[in-house]
Image (cartoon, helix red, strand yellow):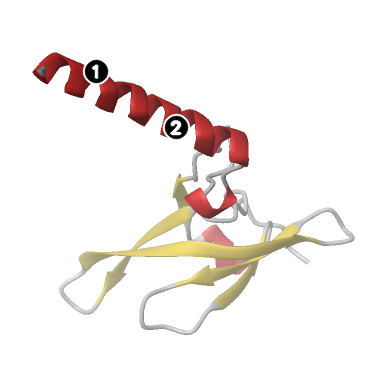
């Protein structure tokens, strides 16, 4: 069993491969996104490579399928979770409402 040099498997990562196709030898560029990933018992990471218009491909670190691809972008880490207004706690809602009322009062007082 041969181990290949491959980029890391990163969930949400963008991968690119460049290959020659046809008799004209024109370089073609293909991009794909890594979907869900899972760490296997042997320590390697396996993931689902998604390409537009083509079936998903199961790839694994150190395997031939992934050796043709380069990792070109990874998702940025969020410092804080994104929360919608529906999840906002009561204190935050009241603080925002208070700020709005202060601004509105200043506008009204400035008019008179």
User: Looking at the picture, does residue 28 appear above or below residue 84?
Assistant: below
Q: Secondary structure at mark 1?
A: helix
Badge 2 local density, few (<14 within 10 Å), some, or many (20+)? few
Q: Position of residue 41 (x, y in %)?
A: 89, 61
The span from disc 2 to disc 1 (Cα, nearest Å) is 16 Å
Q: Mark 2 or mark 1: which is in front?
A: 1
Residue extending farthest to the right is 41
**Res 108 → quadrant:** top left
In which quadrant is the C terminus drawn? top left
**Res 15 → quadrant:** bottom left
Q: Residue placed at 53% from the left, 54% from the top?
A: 86
Residue under label 1, please give it. Answer: 106
Q: Nearer the viewer, residue 34 or 3?
A: 34
Q: Position of residue 55 (x, y in %)?
A: 48, 84
Q: Residue placed at 43% from the left, 34% from the top?
A: 97
Answer left or right for 48 relative to 99: right
Q: Residue placed at 73% from the left, 57% from the top?
A: 45
Q: Secondary structure at mark 2?
A: helix
Residue under label 2, please give it. Answer: 96
Q: Position of residue 109 (x, y in %)?
A: 19, 17
User: Looking at the picture, does residue 51 appear above or below residue 2?
Assistant: below
CB atoms of marks 2 and 1 within 8 Å: no
Residue extending farthest to the front is 112
Count of marks, rendered view: 2
Answer left or right for 41 relative to 47: right
């Amino acid at each position: 069993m041969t181990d290949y040099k491959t980029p890391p498997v990163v969930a949400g990562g963008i991968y690119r491969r460049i290959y020659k196709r046809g008799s004209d030898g024109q370089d073609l560029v293909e991009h794909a996104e890594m979907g869900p990933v899972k760490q296997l018992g042997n320590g390697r990471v396996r993931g689902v490579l998604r390409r537009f218009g083509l079936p998903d491909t199961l790839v694994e670190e150190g395997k031939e399928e992934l050796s043709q691809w380069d990792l070109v972008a990874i998702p940025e880490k969020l410092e804080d979770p994104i929360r919608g207004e529906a999840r906002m706690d009561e204190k935050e809602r009241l603080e925002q409402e208070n700020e709005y009322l202060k601004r509105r009062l200043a506008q009204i007082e400035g008019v008179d």
